[in-house]
């Protein structure tokens, strides 16, 4: 990015930008708010940035958050009501903060050979949806991946801070995976990682919480509006479910267990990196204390 500029400089050029892009907006990707500038004051719109796409939920693959984190311009295709839009997200460092300039242009007619072929339109729609999912989904478990954690956890932390509600994360991994890999092979190990992820995903509220594969056999569970005591109860319930789940490998019944580390943010402000560091440290304590524990 270039050196910091004043936000009013961007506002001054918006009419010029709109000659090239029908829709131009300034976004705070962390708060998911549209930013406007009036009379030397920065004003956040009441509407969310994702409301434009007629969604009631934060985009899984947030292009503005990616641009913000990567400090680079990012492009993405969006589909709404049989129309395709090219979205460009450009991070800009202002004297107040880093914001993202979003440039939106409909590209339906330039993408399709025959715009009347609606079967073709829907085929492309599904293709775009699949591509966007692949960016934030883990191939093995079909859960969210590390990129999603990096993009979504900071947003949920900011929302919890604004709403003055607690947020908890749980780091967990499989205790016996190395033994399974050594004795039965990595293919069986991958199957256990997949099954472990399935149990985690089925144990949380799908509309409020999410589960992501952090890496290897380590997973992160995000519990929104959840205090430490409740997070502990949830982790204990999951731990017991895993402990009681007997997995068949060849002719052998194998029990796997998991260890869990929790971090809750409520009154003290913690970044996503700090929360993960604390939860990971607690996971290490759980494993160091004998495994199959919640710390």
Image (cartoon, grey):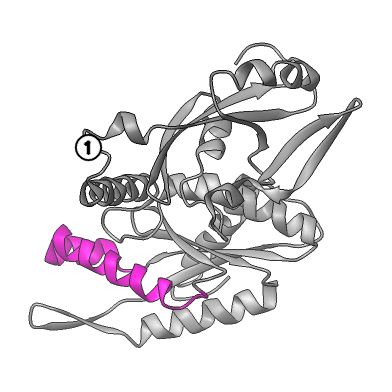
State the image quarter where residue 262 is shown: bottom right
Assess whether residue 29 is covered by the magenta stretch.
Answer: no
Label 1: element kind:
loop
Q: Given the current orientation, which residue lies at the most extreme top position?
A: 3
Q: Is residue 291 above or below residue 116?
A: below
State the image quarter where residue 157 is shown: bottom right
Give the image location of residue 174, x and y in percent.
36, 67
Give the image location of residue 44, x and y in percent.
78, 41
Q: Is residue 65 above or below residue 157?
A: above
Residue drawn at point x = 37 percent, y = 76 percent: 199
Quadrant of the rendering where the N terminus is positioned: top right
Badge 1: how crowded within 10 Å, few (<14), some, or many (20+)? few
* Segment tinted magenta in the rendering: 176-205
Quadrant of the rendering where the C terminus is positioned: bottom right
Report which residue position mark 1 lands on. Answer: 114
Residue drawn at point x = 50 percent, y = 24 percent: 73
Residue drawn at point x = 71 percent, y = 55 percent: 159
């Amino acid at each position: 990015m270039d050196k910091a500029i004043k936000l009013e400089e961007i506002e001054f050029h918006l009419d010029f930008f709109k000659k090239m892009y029908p829709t131009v907006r300034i976004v705070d990707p962390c708060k998911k708010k549209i930013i406007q500038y009036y009379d030397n004051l920065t004003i956040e719109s009441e509407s969310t940035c994702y409301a434009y796409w007629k969604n009631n939920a934060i985009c899984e693959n947030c292009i503005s958050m990616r641009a913000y984190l990567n400090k680079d311009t990012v492009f993405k295709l969006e589909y709404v009501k049989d129309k395709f839009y090219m979205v460009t997200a450009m991070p800009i460092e202002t004297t107040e903060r880093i914001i993202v300039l979003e440039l939106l242009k409909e590209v339906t007619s330039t993408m399709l050979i025959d715009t009347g072929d609606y079967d073709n339109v829907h085929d492309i729609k599904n293709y775009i949806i699949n591509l966007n999912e692949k960016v934030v989904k883990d191939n093995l478990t079909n859960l969210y991946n590390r990129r999603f954690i990096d993009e979504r956890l900071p947003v949920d932390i900011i929302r919890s801070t604004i709403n003055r509600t607690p947020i908890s994360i749980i780091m967990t991994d499989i205790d016996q995976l190395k033994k399974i890999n050594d004795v039965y092979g990595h293919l069986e190990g991958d199957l256990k990682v997949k099954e472990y992820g399935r149990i985690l995903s089925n144990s949380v509220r799908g509309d409020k919480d999410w589960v992501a594969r952090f890496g290897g056999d380590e997973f992160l569970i995000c519990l929104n509006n959840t205090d430490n005591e409740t997070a502990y109860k949830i982790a204990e319930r999951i731990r017991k479910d895993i402990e009681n789940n007997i997995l068949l490998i060849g002719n052998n019944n194998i029990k796997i267990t998991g260890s869990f580390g929790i971090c809750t943010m409520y009154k003290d402000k913690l970044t996503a990196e700090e929360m993960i560091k604390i939860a990971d440290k607690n996971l290490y304590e759980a494993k160091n204390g004998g495994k199959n524990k919640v710390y």
